Amino acid sequence: MKADEIRALGDEELTKQLEEARRELFNLRFRLETRQLVNHREICRVKRNIARMMTIVRERQLAEAQLGGKNTMKGQVPVAAGTGRVGEVS
């Protein structure tokens, strides 16, 4: 899926596609370990698609924050996704 196609999706559809991609990645990894996976490049393709989707989700979060959306962290933004660290806003 291309970035433009992902951007055209609504929030609910994007969330659904992201869950589906994560489920597919789990199944591919399982098939790899049981030596049933024929094309190992599928794992890279799915991981890349997940990264694209998560990037679009983050872009939307940042755009909402800039437009005055609710910021539940009150003056703080995540430093990096998944690190658990929080940094102060300048």
Image (tube, helix red, strand yellow):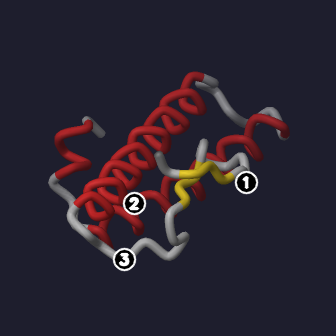
- Name which of mark 1 and mark 2 comes first in the sequence: 2
Residue depicted at x 71% and y 50%: 85
Please name which of the two marks, 1 or 3, marks the residue nearer to the observer: 3
Q: Please name the residue that numbered disc 3 is placed on.
A: 70
- Name which of mark 3 and mark 2 comes first in the sequence: 2
Residue neighbourhood size for the residue with mark 3, other residues' Cα within 10 Å, grouped as few (<14), some (14–19), many (≥20): few
> Tags 1 and 2 in contact by the CB under 8 Å rule?
no
Residue neighbourhood size for the residue with mark 1, other residues' Cα within 10 Å, grouped as few (<14), some (14–19), many (≥20): few
Counting labels gives: 3
Kind of residue at badge 1:
Gly
| Placement of the N terminus among the 4 image quadrants | top left
Left or right of 81 in this view: 45: left
Q: How many angstroms separate mark 1 from mark 3 (CA)?
A: 20 Å
Residue depicted at x 61% and y 46%: 25
Task: Report the front residue among 44 and 55.
Answer: 55
Whether residue 79 is situated above or below residue 23 in the rendered picture: above
Left or right of 40 in this view: 55: left
Residue neighbourhood size for the residue with mark 2, other residues' Cα within 10 Å, grouped as few (<14), some (14–19), many (≥20): some
Rendering coords of residue 81 (x, y %): 59, 47
Whether residue 67 is situated above or below residue 83 in the rendered picture: below
Q: Please name the residue that numbered disc 2 is placed on.
A: 17
Rendering coords of residue 20 (x, y %): 49, 60
Rendering coords of residue 77 (x, y %): 53, 55
Q: Please name the residue that numbered disc 1 is placed on.
A: 84
Q: Is label 2 in a helix, a strand or a loop?
A: helix
- Name the quadrant containing residue 63: bottom left
Residue 65's disc is none
Left or right of 13 in this view: 52: right
